[in-house]
Image (cartoon, rainbow, N blue to C red):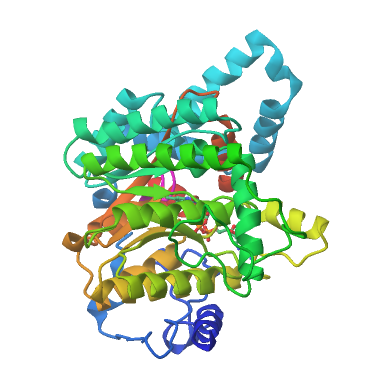
Amino acid sequence: MAMVRSFARRAYRVHTLRGGQAQRTALNIATSNNFSQAPQSANITTTSSTSRGNDGDNVFDFEDTKSLFASVSNGKLMHSAATLNVAAMEPMVDLSLWVMNSRLMDVGLFRNLVLTTIKYTAYDHFVAGADTVETGQTVRRLWDSGLRGIVDYGLEHTNDNESCDKATQKLIETAELSQYLPHSSVSFVAVKVTAVCPVYLLRRVSDLLRWEYKNSSFKLPWKQQTLPIFSESSPFYHTSQQPAPLTADEEHDLELAYKRLQSICDKSFEGNVPVVIDAEDTAIQPAIDYMTYWASFKYNESQRPVVYGTVQAYLKDAGERLYLAKKAADKTGLTVGFKLVRGAYMSSESKLAHSLGAESPIHNTTNDTHDCYNGCATFMLDEVSNRPGGLVLATHNLDSAKLAAQKAREYGITKDSQKLEFASLYGMSDAMTFGLRNAGFNVSKYLPFGPVDQVMPYLLRRAEENKGMLSSSSLDRKLMM
Ligand SMILES: Cc1cc2nc3c(=O)[nH]c(=O)nc-3n(C[C@H](O)[C@H](O)[C@H](O)COP(=O)(O)OP(=O)(O)OC[C@H]3O[C@@H](n4cnc5c(N)ncnc54)[C@H](O)[C@@H]3O)c2cc1C
């Protein structure tokens, strides 16, 4: 455990790259991050290179915008620049958010007008298509420009077996998509466990797993082989008293959830495309990790993982949990893959913790999150460079991408090894995406798809994220113009 703490401490510590100066892009875009150096413990080493060829700044060439955006038509470029510029106007976004959340949306004609406007603006920019046919066309277009697609059918949480069955069918169709597309153009099928297992059950399973972790005599008869789900610093305030055991019906529903996940993994496996399981909020994440590791033991038999989980670096326990799971997997000879994100439920997590009188599970400062992200990325890059495993770095953060690209080069992780994928959301961070592609990395766009009204919550989140002149879209807007 001391080694775990040492890893976590070092992962969070704030360092700057050479000479204490954070690197800047050629365009001198303001960056707020400090890089943390690689976490160092007995078996985690840092190598540093000062040769120009390995310099993080040289990974991206943003000066030659012509070659950067060569694969994008002028029409698309103008549409993207216009959409992102409007999205950066705070009053405009606030007004749109107000309209979309207002009662006016209950009025048929008004609703149709708003949805049509959205369809030709934000939807076209951030969503890959209404169905698998349109999404397939988007994947082909990306593939022609040297990128891959993570296909993600836009689903909300499910609350009963019937909606889980329907959602599973949609996810199977999504997994089948790769069979009609150029080999390897689909890099992953995105899966939400909240679509294959009723959310109430994920809460119950998470409660029981927490209680078992805290009380070693408490046994869970239904529990199957897994990897460590908690660390000492994980939040436990969700479970204040001993939960009742699963009823026979609940155990039956859990069996159904395993089967649904299995049917999606089987289809992906057939198409030789791995699945990546999304992370949600801490109330249900233990059950999601449990099911992810359950599926990993079933499918990750070869050198390349078929099932990837997700770690959210904004959580204080993220570094420890990643370390414990990876090391336990190594011990049992299991190949594991992780997608690393910062995390999307910041305000709801803090609100819930506050309402229960507990400390927030989110890092106290943004820099702590950045350090955790960079520390976890460096740790995993080091791990996959000399052992089987996989890493998806899902981020729009240019500093994190630069650091990781630099480390990947130092560790000799090649594109052909298929061990590292950079990923960003469709319609976001295009300059970084093309920069990484030009630098010789595997790069994917995360492709949510579905009808306009179904993906509305997703679009609202994108609108929030891109608002303001300092948002992560500012580099794209500048270069596109
Ligand atoms: C391909 C892909 C897949 C994704 N999958 C998931 C998923 O499965 N689950 C999930 O939860 N999210 C997921 N996300 C969303 C992701 O978690 C982030 O919300 C999003 O990518 C922004 O983070 P960034 O790395 O791009 O960083 P940045 O552009 O650096 O943005 C990070 C933002 O978080 C804020 N922030 C972070 N930590 C703190 C803190 N401690 N205090 C205050 N502010 C803070 C910063 O202010 C900043 O605005 C995914 C994103 C991508 C690109």
Q: Where does the image place residue 243, in percent across and percent down from the top left? A: 71, 54
Which residue does the image show at 63% across and 47% down from the upper left? 246
Q: Is 441 placed above or below 176 here?
A: below
Q: Determine which quarter of the picture holds residue 427.
A: top left
Residue 317 shows up from this direction: yes
Which residue does the image show at 20% across and 45% down from the upper left? 184
Q: Where does the image place residue 277, in percent across and percent down from the top left? A: 43, 49
Q: Is residue 439 left or right of residue 217?
A: left
Which residue does the image show at 29% across and 40% down from the upper left? 266
Q: Is 77 placed above or below 454 here?
A: below
Highlighted magenta segment, given as a residue range: 425-430
Q: Is residue 426 magenta?
A: yes
Q: Where does the image place residue 229, in percent across and percent down from the top left? A: 52, 64
Which residue does the image show at 61% across and 67% down from the upper left? 213
Q: Where does the image place residue 197, in percent across and percent down from the top left? A: 53, 39
Q: Is residue 291 left or right of residue 410?
A: right
Question: Magenta residues: mostly which secondary structure?
Answer: loop
Q: Is residue 402 magenta?
A: no
Q: Is residue 307 left or right of residue 119?
A: left
Residue 344 shows up from this direction: no
Ligand 1, image quadrant it occupies: bottom right
